[in-house]
Amino acid sequence: MLFSEDRLVHRDTYYGSIEVICGSMFSGKTEELIRRVRRSQLAKLPVEIFKPAMDTRYHQTDITSHDSNRISSISVEHSSTILLLGSAAKVVGIDEAQFFDDELPDVCTKLANAGIRVIVAGLDMDFKGQPFGPVPALMAIAEHVTKVHAVCVRCGAPANYSYRLTQDDRQPLLGEKESYEPRCRTCFFGSK
Ligand code: ZN
């Protein structure tokens, strides 16, 4: 009996970890985040999901994937709020991580060290093919990194770039998915 209780304590202590799900637009990042969070909900674990307050497309308090799979979430202005509101959860999901501030990796580390499973989804690269916001740092400190791929609209190969169809040079262009298309390396760099 003592042995099994001991194991439980240890299991709880070492439960904390960071998982990153990243890829281009249309790669199914949010769907994968929702899939993992739903499994945690089935396991009756307390779950909280966060997204940056600037991401207001579709629905204010849900995270919504492009195929309208919805799950309730909290919009926050700064990553430090996740530390405040997420500490009581066993599983914390974070979507659109690329739009958070540079403190997000530190916040995720603190949550994971407190025994929380942290699942982060976000774009790994911007439309120029450059590492995007805090996501590269999160990939470095995570136990698990999953790169998901879209399908290149030009040739059908796995796509990991978000090609911008407009000439607008502003960075995010949130929710304007008609302004982007997924492309593979060859088709992304071939048309520059
Ligand atoms: Zn291609």
Image (spheres, rainbow, N blue to C red):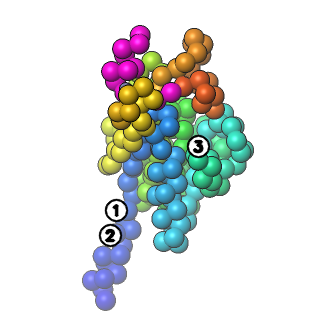
Residue 103 on image: x %, y %: 49, 35
Residue 2 on image: x %, y %: 30, 86
The residues bearing labels 1 and 3 have C-alpha atoms spaced at a distance of 34 Å
Residue 147 on image: x %, y %: 36, 41
From this view, report whether residue 144 is shown above or below residue 151: below
The span shown in magenta is 181-192
Q: Which residue is mark 2?
A: 10
User: Of the residues under marks 1 and 3, which one precedes in the sequence?
Assistant: 1
Q: Residue at x 59, y 23 (%)?
A: 179
User: Of the residues under marks 2 and 3, which one precedes in the sequence?
Assistant: 2
Q: Which disc, if any, is residue 14?
A: 1
Judge left or right: residue 9 versus residue 69: left
Callout 2: CB less than 8 Å from ligand 1? no
Q: Residue at x 36, y 35 (%)?
A: 158
Q: Which residue is mark 3?
A: 66
* Marks 1 and 2 in Cβ contact (< 8 Å): yes
Label 2 neighbourhood size at 10 Å, few (<14), some (14-19), many (20+)? few
Callout 1: CB less than 8 Å from ligand 1? no
Query: SS of the residue at dot 2?
Result: helix
Label 1 neighbourhood size at 10 Å, few (<14), some (14-19), many (20+)? some
Amino acid type shown at disc 3: His
Query: Of 188 and 168, which appears nearest the observer?
Result: 188
Query: Of 52 and 25, which appears nearest the observer?
Result: 25
In which quadrant is the C terminus drawn?
top left
In which quadrant is the N terminus drawn?
bottom left
Judge left or right: residue 138 versus residue 166: left
* Marks 1 and 3 in Cβ contact (< 8 Å): no
* Marks 2 and 3 in Cβ contact (< 8 Å): no
In this rendering, which labeled residue sits more in front, label 1 or label 3?
3
Amino acid type shown at disc 2: His
Q: Which disc, if any, is residue 191?
A: none
